[in-house]
Image (cartoon, rainbow, N blue to C red):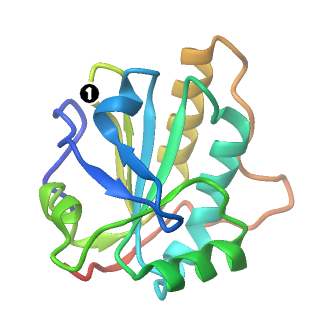
Amino acid sequence: MSRIDVGDDAPPFALDSSSGARFSLADAIKQGPVVVVFFKILCPVCQFTLPFIERLFQMYGGARVSVVGISQDDAESTREFCDEYGITFPALLDPEDYPASNDYGITNVPTYYLISPDGKIEVASVGLNKKALEQISEWLASFLQQPALPIFGPDEIVPESKTGCGSKN
């Protein structure tokens, strides 16, 4: 569960990526919506879910839509995870005291949010949730004034939901 839900203001954060670049939520939402996913590398549900977040990034990410992960692991392990699972969106590092995870009340991962340009949470989900991912896709497509694209392939076996793992914080 998370203490942040749909309609709430997204707590601000500024974190370094695994490549050393700084990312600020306040700066990103000035450009458009932001998809944020909290994860840890050894969580099997994160390993299964983050490639679907990557698909959202490939379909909608760009100058007007940001997609970022917030890793609860170290930079080297996070880079290796991203390489192994084909994650190309920025992976931010939540330091050892987990300030961003704590601000969002993260208890399980993956937990992901769609944050609108006004800083409000539009979609919030814990674990794998097909409907939430489809909601994000539809919202982003509407924002970009384009048709929603399918996230899941017709031959993929994806459960409707899957409980995530306990968070580190």
- The quadrant of the picture occupied by the C terminus is bottom left
Spot occupied by residue 157 in the image (x, y as percentages of width and height): 74, 67
Residue at left 16%, top 34%? 8
Q: Residue 44, image x and y in percent?
A: 53, 84
Relative vertical location of residue 136 with respect to residue 33 in this rendering, above or below:
below
- On screen, 136 above or below 17? above
Question: As drawn, is 54 to the left or to the right of 104?
Answer: right
Residue 35: % across, % down: 45, 42
Which part of the image, by quadrant, shows the N terminus? bottom left
Estimate the x, y position of residue 78 in percent, counting from the top left.
51, 77
Which residue is found at the position 62% from the left and 23% from the top? Answer: 141
Residue shown at 74%/33% (left/top)?
A: 149
Choose top left, top right, bottom left or bottom right for residue 84. Answer: bottom right
| Residue 86, placed above or below residue 30 | below
Query: Are there few (<14), some (14-19), or many (20+) residues within 10 Å of tag 1?
Result: many
Q: Closest to the observer: 118 or 92?
A: 92
The residue tagged 1 is: 119
Picture mark count: 1
Which residue is at the far front?
20
Question: Which image quadrant for residue 65?
Answer: top right
Judging from the image, what secondary structure is the residue with disc 1 in? Answer: loop
Q: From this viewpoint, which residue is outermost toward the right?
A: 155
80 versus 57 height, above or below: below
Residue at 73% from the left image edge and 52% from the top image edge: 152
Kind of residue at disc 1 = Gly
| Residue 88 placement, left or right of 135 | right
